[in-house]
Amino acid sequence: MVNDEVNNKAINIEIRVAQYSAKAILKSMKKIIEYADEKSQPLADYISEKRKTNSRKLKDMVKKGQLENIDEQIENKFYAFKDYAYRRKINWGFVRDKDTRLYINNTNYTKEMNNENRKRLEDLF
C-alpha cells in the first residue's frame, strides 16, 4: 500500500516535470522559428549555422568552471518539486556545494550561487 502511494507520487512528479519540459521546449521552438524568420533563413539553415557557431563540448565547459549542472531541465524540475511540496506541505530544497559548504534553496530557482535565496545548511540545522 505504501509502495503504491510512493510510486503514484513519483509518477505524478514525473508527469509534472514532463509538462513543464514540454512547455519550455515549445516556447524555445517558437523563439527559434521567430529568429529564423527575422533573418529570412530556412529553419534548418538557421539551426545548422547556430550549432556551428555556438557549439562547445560539455567536458570543456565543466573543466573551465563554466558549467556545474548539465541537466537542462533543472529549472522545470525545481518548480515542479516546489509545487508538489507546497501542495503536500513537505519541507524540501535543492542543495549545491560552493567552497566546500552546502547551500539550500527552495524559493526561486537561480544558477548563481551568490543569490540571497541560497542559505547555508549549517545555519539552518
Image (tube, rainbow, N blue to C red):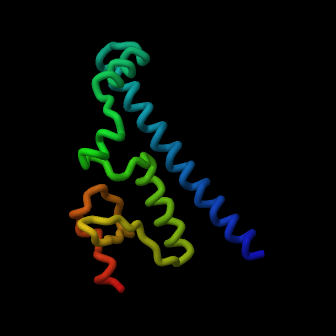
Q: Residue furthest left?
A: 114
Q: Quadrant of the N terminus?
A: bottom right
- Quick check: 105 left or right of 10? left
The residue at the point 35 percent across, 41 percent down is: 59
| Residue 3 horizontal/vertical position (percent) | 73, 71
> What is the tally of numbered marks visible in this picture?
0
Classify residue 71 as left or right of residue 97: right
Q: Nearer the viewer, residue 71 or 36?
A: 71
Q: In the rendered image of this protein, does residue 17 appear above or below residue 58?
A: below
Residue 105 lies, with reference to residue 34, above or below; the image says below
Q: Quadrant of residue 117?
A: bottom left
**Residue at (31, 71) in percent of width and height:** 103
Q: Is residue 108 above or below residue 20?
A: below
Query: Residue at coordinates 35% horizontally, 69% vertically from top-left?
Result: 105
Residue at far right of view: 1
Whole-percent x and y of residue 98?
Answer: 27, 65
Whole-percent x, y for residue 114 in the image: 21, 63
Answer with the quarter of the image where residue 6 lies.
bottom right
Figure quadrant of residue 108? bottom left
